[in-house]
Image (tube, rainbow, N blue to C red):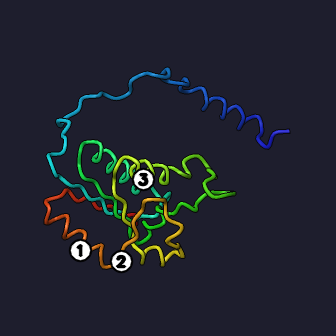
Amino acid sequence: MSVFDDEILAAMEKSRSEIPHPSQEKGTNLYGSTKLFPDYQASEGQSWLTLVHGIPHESSVSFVAVLQTTRALRKGFDATLYFYGPGALACADTRGFPTTGDVAFPGNQNMNDAIKTFIAEGGTVLCCRFGMALHGQREEDLIEGVIPCHPLDVQDAVIHFANKGAIINSVYNL
């Protein structure tokens, strides 16, 4: 027995059939592909710094920052990711459910996998010890290759990279 009466069921069927589905076949282009800017590559010695102050999985902001920085690395930039505040949580290699490393839901390990790829391709990842401490994270919990650093290093890293003329990208998750 349905929880809906015949009138509601008829309205549901009418609503469902108003627009044919799928409206486009799989593989149909929905958007143009014109790229506006040249495919810039890094000049010799050019640097890129991305600061990440965002909780993994709260939004796509932190994940997209990792992907952008990986792209910069692939374009030849000397690329560095710096996680601080709640961003430090992204550097934990002890995430997963029911066991460490397990994918609890699709995309659960995207950040970890992207950070590991970035490191494997030669990128540098820094993680603030204060951000770690705020969330009960231990240094031995970090993804292999992540470099823990002092809380005062955040500002000095920005100064260091600014003095080198680096591109600095800073993302927040509010």
Q: Is residue 139 left or right of residue 75?
A: right
Disc 3 packing (10 Å; few <14; some 14–19; many ≥20):
many
Q: Which mark is residue 70?
A: none
Residue at (54% x, 24% y) in the render: 22
Q: Secondary structure at mark 2?
A: loop
Residue at (39% x, 66% y) in the render: 147
Task: List the residue tagged with mark 3.
Answer: 63
Alpha carbon distance from label 3 to label 2: 23 Å
Q: Amino acid at mark 3?
A: Phe
Alpha carbon distance from label 1 to label 2: 10 Å
Q: Amino acid at mark 2?
A: His
Q: Secondary structure at mark 3?
A: helix
Q: Who is closer to the viewer here, 39 or 153?
A: 153
Q: Amino acid at mark 1?
A: Asp
Task: List the residue tagged with mark 1.
Answer: 156
* Circles 3 and 2 in contact, beta carbons < 8 Å: no
Q: Which mark is residue 150?
A: 2
Residue 164 sits in quarter: bottom left
**Residue 162 place in picture, x, y as percent:** 16, 65
Judge depth for marks 3 and 1 and give the one in front: 1
Q: Is residue 28 left or right of residue 162?
A: right
Disc 1 packing (10 Å; few <14; some 14–19; many ≥20):
few
Residue 13 sits in quarter: top right
